[in-house]
Image (cartoon, rainbow, N blue to C red):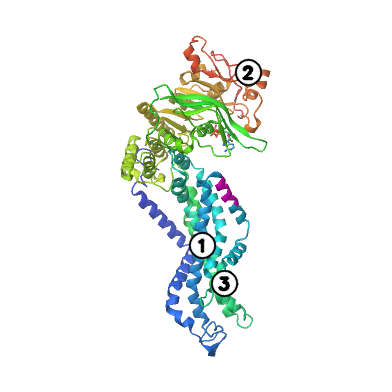
Amino acid sequence: MGTDQGGRTGTDQGGRTGKTSARRSRWWAVARTPVGACAGGLLLAITVLAVLAPLLWGDQAAVVDTSAIQQGPSEAHPLGTDSLGRDLLYRVLVATRLSLLLALAATLLGVSLGILLGAAPSVLPRRTGRLVTAVVNIAVAFPALLLALFFAVVFGVGAKGAVLAIGLATAPAFARLTQTLSASVAGKDFVAAARVAGVGRFRLLVRHVLPNIAEPLAVNATIGAGSALLAFAGLSFLGLGVQAPDYDWGRLLGEGLNRIYLTPAPALAPCVAVVVTGLAFNLFGEAAAAALGVRTLSRRTAPAPAPVAAPAAAPDSLEAGEAVLAVEDLRVSFPGTNGPITPVRGVSFLVRSGEAVGVVGESGSGKSLTAMAVSGLVEPPGQVSAGRLEFLGTPLLDTPQRALRPLLGTSLALVFQDPMTSFNPVRGIGRQLAEVAEEHQQLGRKAAHERAVDRLRAVRIPAPERRARQYPYEFSGGMRQRAMIGMGLMGDPRLIIADEPTTALDVTVQRQVLRLLGEVRAARDTAILLISHDVTVVAQTCDRVLVMYAGRIVEDLPAADLYERARHPYTRALLAAVPDLGTDRDRPLAVIEGRPPEPDRMPQGCAFAPRCPRADSRCLAESPEPEPVARREDRRESHKETHRVACWHPVEEAGEPAAKTVAGGTA
Ligand SMILES: Nc1ncnc2c1ncn2[C@@H]1O[C@H](COP(=O)(O)OP(=O)(O)OP(=O)(O)O)[C@@H](O)[C@H]1O
């Protein structure tokens, strides 16, 4: 297994080469299976036939022999002759090329159009995008063959019309497939990272989404070619496709059908050709899917940390201590079955320049949504509102996206939890870092690459030149997290939002990543918003801690005061649930009794009241707002400013028992 420092012994040498040879061996393994071998053999034979048959037998197939009209199979004509005495065996063989070319042309048209239609909603304005989606949804509801017949009539008889008809009829299914696959990739962290880095919609689609869905699309296109072949034969058979003097298998089938009861061979031979070729396409699609299909996609997008980065262009006027991020009454809502739900309900806080602020709370308390809202990553139908939401003095909700892009792209960096989904798996690490500089600093390719290497070196990636050329899967989890921070440093980040950046890492690597964040902060006066469910990590890393519960901040206090002076019963309960050296190891760990409320069933009063031993009727009826509190022995105004608690009955400093913590109970 790879180490964080020097890296991955097995994959160290030759990233691309290793990847290519791994692919090659997968293809070989599949080629040796019965399906792979049949598919390969059949396709090869059909391709050779398509190339050579018209050259070798084109003339013989056209020879008219009025003395041998409509004969059955004989030694001279193994499949018999047609109504002009032409040899049907030659004609079936020669028809391979046209049948194949037309099917491939129709597939190409259908797949291209489908990808365009499927991808369009992600780059078009929202309304137009919805219209395109609606049209695709309606078209998908019709059977493709029915659509093909309809379009064939519209475009008129002939091969060209049939290609257009089958292409158009195939497109909706591919559009739907593209939409579905794109949606699965669009939610990945590396796409979010690229968005925050200011990558435009079109580039996002072309560079980050489409390359990651190319393989399943290619596999489906191959299988689709078999269907197109069948559809084409159908149209020609009906007289809507290829017209005389040209001929494909469909036309030969139509001609042979008239006398099928007398001599079945003229009709059966083109049928067999269509079936065998369709089978070859389908088997090849299956084999390709086994070698690189959807499994490859999911495996590649599996593990690793990630950051986002940005280049220069932010207001430089902030003094140390000034707010980098100002949040007041932030709310995030989603439509629910019984009306909107609001998982983030009026959150307010400041992050000052160079300050490290930690956000803790149980799962579902709204930590990540708060971070996403601040980064502009909440997608419709989610709605974000706030009394004030300013980053470096710029109101995020009122400023057009276009204007925000350079600001967020250069001054805000993200580090995500899952190191594997944070980077685009099909692009080199260095390329992804360089993209930020190309986008925002108008650096040329070479200069951007040099900067990327420099930043990888700054986050202590060994052999950065070589590593920059490698792919995310060749980095260990810790290295990917550091590379993500390096990506953040491509610009001049004033705030790094790190959402559970070390959860997927082991303890040693966790420390390295946290230390690196601390160093970046010290060197550049960069503020950090660190989201974690681990109170200990936050207490060690941050200046201030925000404790969230059920979509609200219930306590906001200096990290130094966390263990001794936390006043909210929930904060106390969280701390009590963390084992330390003094914890009795013979007893089950303490947990907080009960569960947080669901966002769609928020109680009227304090959301923590049902789990709180101090709750009374007021707590059940009225929701407390965060109020400044002061230490008992030190009621200085400065302290009051830095400690807020939302509780009607805060715990006294002396440390009387807090919430209902139970030994071994279910949380
Ligand atoms: N797109 C969404 N649509 C509806 N509800 C959502 C959506 N995203 C998040 N939520 C809800 O919002 C609440 C808060 O989610 P959030 O991810 O912010 O929690 P969290 O505190 O970060 O938890 P965790 O530590 O598990 O990540 C959860 O109840 C979640 O189900």
| Position of residue 338 measured from the top left corner of the image (x, y, whole percent) | 68, 36
404 or 364: nearer the viewer:
404
Q: Amino acid at mark 3?
A: Ser
Q: Nearer the viewer, mark 1 or mark 2?
A: 1
Which is the main secondary structure of the residues drawn in magenta?
Answer: helix
**Residue of label 2:** 614
Q: Which mark is residue 236?
A: 3
Q: Earlier in the sequence, mark 2 or mark 3?
A: 3
404 or 166: nearer the viewer:
404
| Position of residue 470 measured from the top left corner of the image (x, y, whole percent) | 36, 46
Q: Amino acid at mark 1?
A: Thr
Residue at far top of view: 633
Question: The magenta stretch spans which residues?
Answer: 127-134
User: Which residue corresponds to the image point at 67% horizontal and 21% vertical from the top-left?
Assistant: 621
Mark 3: secondary structure: helix
Decide: few, some or many residues near mark 3? Use Cα within 10 Å; few <14, some 14-19, many ≥20. many
> 556 above or below 211?
above
**Magenta stretch containing residue 129, yes or no?**
yes
**Residue of label 1:** 107
Mark 2: secondary structure: loop
| Position of residue 588 measured from the top left corner of the image (x, y, whole percent) | 57, 27
